[in-house]
Amino acid sequence: MATITKRSEDYSKWYQELVIKAGLAEPSEVRGCMIIKPYGFAIWEKIKDYLDRRFKETGHKNAYFPIFIPKSFFSKEAEHVEGFAKEVAVVTHYRLKNSPDGKGVVVDPEARLEEEYIVRPTSETIIWNTYRNWIQSYRDLPILINQWANVVRWEMRTRMFLRTSEFLWQEGHTAHETAEEAQAEARQMLEVYREFAENLLAVPVVPGRKSPAERFAGAVETYTIEGLMQDGKALQMGTSHFLGQNFAKAFDVKFLNRDGKLEYVWATSWGVSTRLIGALIMTHSDDNGLVLPPRIAPLQVVIIPIYKKADQLKQITGYIQPIIKGLRKKGITVEFDDDNNKTPGWKFNEYELKGVPVRLAIGPRDMQNRTVEVARRDTLEKKSYPVDNIVSVIEDLLKQMQKDIFNRALEYRQEHTYYVDTWEEFEHRISEGGFVVAHWDGTAETEARIKELTKATIRVLPLEEIKEKGKDPLTGKPSERRVLFARAY
RNA sequence: CGGGGUGUAGCGCAGUCAGGUUAGCGCGCUACGUUCGGGACGUAGAGGUCGCGGGUUCAAAUCCCGCCACCCCGACCA
């Protein structure tokens, strides 16, 4: 019997079992790398389709740059090296040969690369090295490019979707004439992410800035959307960086501006990854399995027949044809599970585990009464409806569920967001989990000290500023605004 | 990289302390039949380099030595 560990018993065990048993992904033979299975990949494809459309609507084009980056590129931006050096995979050889002892193959020592390549942990360096050749004048700007790719960061500890050594993502890399334009771009993409997270994934997020200590390596300003997971830990779900002229200077990318003067180009980069699937799982799911908001669910409606004999199944199959057609016409994905080897009860549990938003059950009783039993995954509520206008009932229900799932997550976040003024309360709230909204004296020292003492970091300085005079709970120094602290993934 | 743990069928485990027929159990899998409104049941069957290498012994999943892999907890991170 495939039941999963309860969240209250062991949250990370629950998470891992859920990912595997719902068929999203499984661990692979490669340490820290996962196999994304069709059901999990279908979610990624939905994420990708929506965002790709939004990127294009905001003027971006897709391109592709190499997975390998010459090692020397990497060292051109000092902070960037500092940030990634400890977790890059390095390609040193290009050939294998048969082992001298006849067992298998070994790396051919003769085939050592002149200059090693690193496997991209992110592509700023190779892209800015390329932009140098593409940009001469302000007329060449802006360049608005996105790429869908895989990247590798050799993390110490991994968890499927949340942190894997290899992950899939998109990275936007734009080049601009002015700082203002680049800043506006970074902010625009943050808003694209926020809208996407809240409306498609139904995950409420706090958009804002990172503190200097939490900034991307090489960024002047890092914007983030932060979500709060059910175990009270924060998750960074997407970032958008204003890179200033740092990469332009490192790669010598200059343009002739409108005043006829040479100037360094202004840059942004922004990305979201397969981590979003982890956020989706951890925000909504329960002890029965996944709960997927309808807009992101690969399968929105499943129909389960209840029957004894083959002729009964035939009858049901006929009965539901108009429903299937009607739903498909509305763009709703639907499957009819007539697998004879599984009982209805087994199927009920299985589709709950997989988070299919709406389940229809149809048996002799329903056919007699001209009804359909409709069960919604989020509340596990069951109700019978007349078959005649069932398609519009389902259509409305899916819309309602999308809202309800978001609101429930928002409510959870509000209930776990605490305004705190004393250090004692700060420590207490952090240890219980949740967002702690507190004053900060603005120094990196205090931030580091708080991290040391509580493992909490400043997750975000909200765009909607909470401006008020107060005192830092740890140091008692004056502060102008509150920021969000939490323990994070 | 420090601390702890685990490797036995596809999955989850027992057996190891105390060596001894043919290595078990549950789930899953295959076939047939009966079932089917919340994870059905019966019968028959398939499936194993006991992580790898070496040693001790008449005899090793079990004892000894070495190695490897993975998991959990910390430090590091999207």
Image: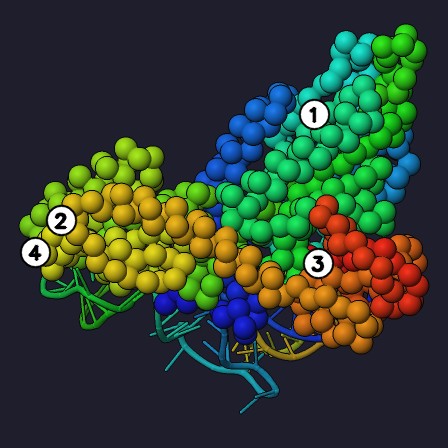
Q: CA distance from mark 2 to mark 3?
A: 50 Å
Of the image marks 1 and 4, the number of the one nearer the N terminus: 1
Percent coordinates x, y for residue A277 in the rendering: 55, 48
Marks 2 and 3, the one that precedes in the sequence: 2
- Asked where in the image residue A488 lies, by quadrant, the reply is bottom right
The residue shown at (67%, 23%) is A145
Task: Give A232 or A339, whichever is nearer the viewer.
Answer: A232
Q: Which numbered disc covers residue A225?
A: none
Q: Which mark is residue A66?
A: 1
Mark 2 / mark 1, whichever is N-terminal = 1
CA separation in Å, label 2 and label 4? 11 Å
Considering only order in the chain, which callout, 1 or 3, is on the residue closer to the N terminus?
A: 1
Q: Amino acid at mark 4?
A: Gln
Dot 4 corresponds to which residue?
A368
Rounded to the nearest whole Å, what is the CA distance between mark 3 and mark 4?
Answer: 54 Å
Q: Does residue A289 lie above or below A58 as drawn?
A: below
What is the number of the mark on residue A488?
A: 3
Q: Chain of mark 2?
A: A
Q: Mark 2 vs mark 4: which is more N-terminal?
A: 2
- Judged left or right of residue B33, residue A255 is right
**Callout 2: SS:** helix
Q: Chain of mark 1?
A: A
Chain of the residue on which disc 4 is drawn: A
Residue type, mark 1 in image: Pro
Q: Quadrant of the N terminus of chain A?
A: bottom left
Say which residue label 2 marks: A316
- State the CA–CA distance, disc 3 to disc 1: 32 Å
